[in-house]
Amino acid sequence: MNRIFSRPLRLATGLFLCVLVLAAGCSQEPATKSDTGDKSEPAMHVAVVDESRVFNESNAGLEGVKMLNELNKSLREQLTAMQTKAQNGTDQDVAGFRGAVQQYQDIMNNQQRALYDAVQEKYVSVLTKYREDHGIAVVFGQENAVSFDPDVDITTQVIEALNAAKVELPEIDPATFDLTPKPAAEEAPAAQESSMEKTAPENATAAPATEAPEAPAAENASGANATGANATE
């Protein structure tokens, strides 16, 4: 008989203990990171910036665009004059115009790159400081963000910070860039022949005119202007 009553007693005791454990668990609030003091996983602060706006709307970017437009206007005026001359000119005029076009493209690309690099260097410095001062962990370019909350867009703030900083842009003087090729040395062979007739023996012949240097090629003109570009930079 003891065995018959002991088994139900053990079952009842076990059920009673389970009820007590469940009741104790329900009475406790879930622990949070702030309660436990666990700071191993800090909140991730993310921001985005529209770099195209930074370069197109900042004072440094606007000044750079103005400088490039002035240079472009000056060079285009030279190209227009050379094109008109080449249309009814000699093969040398045509070759000179083609060389000037390539030279124009090189100058504009080089000056645009120099201005961009100057703004980019200061922009990165300003953005880094802004990120550190505001406790931002990561800043993404807006073009790389698939979706984001407008509240994390810091473009306007970065533009204001960049405007407050001093951006040293390279000087660009359009007057220092000349696309016009140097005239061919037409008088040099004649002067050379005259000098040789006075000093050379009677059976010596003057230097043939075909050996006179031709009009400077495009790379020569480009080299001259490249020096000017480096000087302005």
Image (cartoon, grey):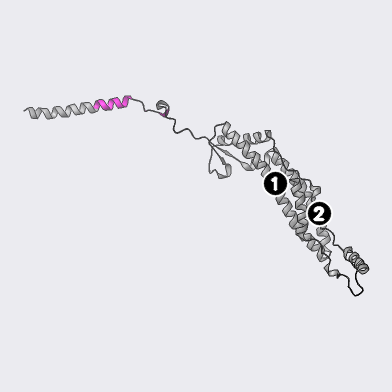
The residues bearing labels 2 and 1 have C-alpha atoms spaced at a distance of 23 Å
Question: Relative to 114, does residue 155 appear above or below in the rendering?
Answer: above
Rendered image: mark on residue 98: none
Q: Report if the CB atoms under discs 2 and 1 are less than 8 Å apart.
A: no
For the residue labelled by badge 2, is the local secondary structure a helix, a strand or a loop?
A: helix
Q: Where is residue 6 in the image (x, y as percent from the top left)?
A: 11, 28
Q: Nearer the viewer, residue 228 or 91?
A: 228
Determine which residue is flagged by label 1. Answer: 114
Viewer can see residue 82: yes
Toward the bottom, the furthest residue is: 203
Toward the left, the furthest residue is: 1
Single out the mark in the foreground, 2 or 1.
1
Q: Position of residue 86 (x, y in %)?
A: 82, 62
Q: Quadrant of residue 66?
A: top right
Badge 2 density bin: few <14, some 14–19, many ≥20, Cα 10 Å = some
For the residue labelled by badge 1, is the local secondary structure a helix, a strand or a loop?
A: helix
Viewer can see residue 155: no
Question: Relative to 172, does residue 98 appear above or below in the rendering?
Answer: below
Q: Which of 61 and 146 is in front in this view?
A: 61
Residues in magenta?
Answer: 19-33
Determine which residue is flagged by label 2. Answer: 78
| Amino acid type of the residue that numbered disc 1 sits on in the rendered structure | Ala
Q: Where is residue 113 in the image (x, y as percent from the top left)?
A: 68, 48
The residue under the point 12% across, 30% down is 7
| Amino acid type of the residue that numbered disc 2 sits on in the rendered structure | Gln
